[in-house]
Every structure is written in structure tokens, then in C-alpha cells.
């Protein structure tokens, strides 16, 4: 997988999270995921088309999603994911992907993104077909983590 494709995802996610939460997320060790892989219980999926094709999955634990949504809403204390906080988490994914698309476009790599889709459940299993997945773990404060899984289709296909 081309590193020129991955760096904009890292840069955009750190920038957007800093802007929306006031905390600079700490980048963990980026690694290749084996498929299928287990996910946290809240995921937001955004599709990619254009020069690169695939999908991006933002995975949150309930605690991390509440932490991020709370920060995005000015520090309002949240105890459950209501429609407003779910919308905030989906919009976060949309903003990260929009910024990523802009960064890629500035490098001559045009992509389009799909609207985000949120899934919630226990023991979610993700299985990107015919794609390599890079996991970008981000610590957004305390023990609150977001995994950004970038799954890209093989370029030869």
C-alpha cells in the first residue's frame, strides 16, 4: 500500500480531532490488520471512490464515542449516545474524510467520499473483501481510543 495514501488520513484525523475536541490525539503504532478483525461496538463507515477505492472505518468504544461527542458539543456531559451525539460522531467522520480528500487532491489524487453510515452492536466483525487494511490508532485523551481502519482495493484490479 502506498504510504502517500495513508499519511493524509493521519494528518487529517489529527487536525480535525484537535479542532473539534481541543485535544491533539496521540498517534499509536500504525499496522496492517488481518481480515476479518474485531471492532469496537460503534463504527462509522465511509466509502472511497476515484483514484483510490475502498472504505474507511472509524471504531469507537461507547466510552470513547461519548468522550469525543461530549468534547464536540462544548463539554456537555453525555451518559448515552442519543441522536445528537450519534450525529456528532458521524459528522466527525465526514469532516476527517473531507479533509483527507482535500489533502489527497492537493497531491493529484482525486477521490470522492460517500456519506457516513453508523453501526452499533456487540462483537462487530469487519471483513473488507479484497482490500488491504491499515489501522491508525489514535489516543484522544485518557484511555479513549479511536481506530481508523483504511481499507484500500488493490491497485491492479
Image (tube, rainbow, N blue to C red):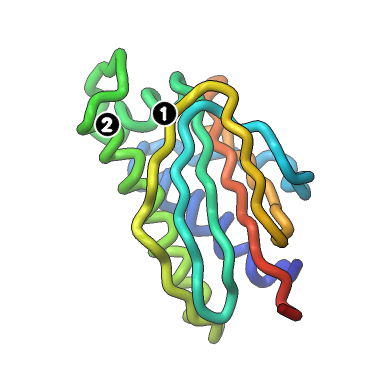
Label 2 secondary element: helix
Residue 155 percent across, percent down from the top left: 71, 77
Q: Is residue 102 above or below residue 73?
A: below
Label 1 secondary element: helix
- The numbered disc on residue 7 is none
- Indicate left or right for 101 with 37 as reference: left
Can residue 136 be seen here?
A: yes
Can residue 141 be seen here?
A: no
The residue at 38%/47% (across/down) is 117
Rounded to the nearest whole Å, what is the CA distance between mark 1 and mark 2? 8 Å
Q: Nearer the viewer, residue 69 or 38?
A: 38
Q: Nearer the viewer, residue 149 or 14?
A: 149
Residue 45 percent across, percent down from the top left: 47, 49
- The numbered disc on residue 85 is 2
Locate the N terminus by quadrant: bottom right
Q: Earlier in the sequence, mark 1 or mark 2?
A: 1
Indicate the quadrant where residue 150 lies: bottom right
- The numbered disc on residue 65 is 1
Residue 80 percent across, percent down from the top left: 30, 17
Question: Are discs 1 and 2 less than 8 Å apart at CB?
Answer: yes
The residue at 43%/30% (across/down) is 120
Q: Is residue 119 above or below residue 33?
A: above
Amino acid at each position: 500500500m502506498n504510504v502517500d495514501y495513508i499519511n493524509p488520513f493521519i494528518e487529517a484525523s489529527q487536525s480535525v480531532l484537535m479542532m473539534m475536541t481541543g485535544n491533539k490525539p496521540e498517534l499509536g503504532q500504525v499496522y496492517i490488520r488481518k481480515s476479518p478483525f474485531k471492532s469496537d461496538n460503534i463504527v462509522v463507515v465511509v466509502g472511497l471512490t476515484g483514484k483510490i477505492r475502498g472504505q474507511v472505518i472509524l471504531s469507537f468504544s461507547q466510552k470513547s464515542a461519548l468522550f469525543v461527542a461530549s468534547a464536540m458539543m462544548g463539554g456537555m456531559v453525555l451518559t448515552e449516545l442519543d441522536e445528537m451525539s450519534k450525529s456528532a460522531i458521524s459528522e466527525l467522520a465526514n469532516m476527517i474524510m473531507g479533509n483527507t480528500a482535500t489533502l489527497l487532491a492537493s497531491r493529484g489524487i482525486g477521490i470522492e467520499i460517500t456519506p457516513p453510515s453508523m453501526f452499533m452492536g456487540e462483537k462487530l466483525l469487519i471483513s473488507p473483501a479484497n482490500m488491504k487494511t491499515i489501522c491508525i490508532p489514535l489516543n484522544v485523551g485518557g484511555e479513549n481510543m479511536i481506530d481508523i481502519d483504511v481499507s484500500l482495493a488493490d491497485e491492479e484490479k
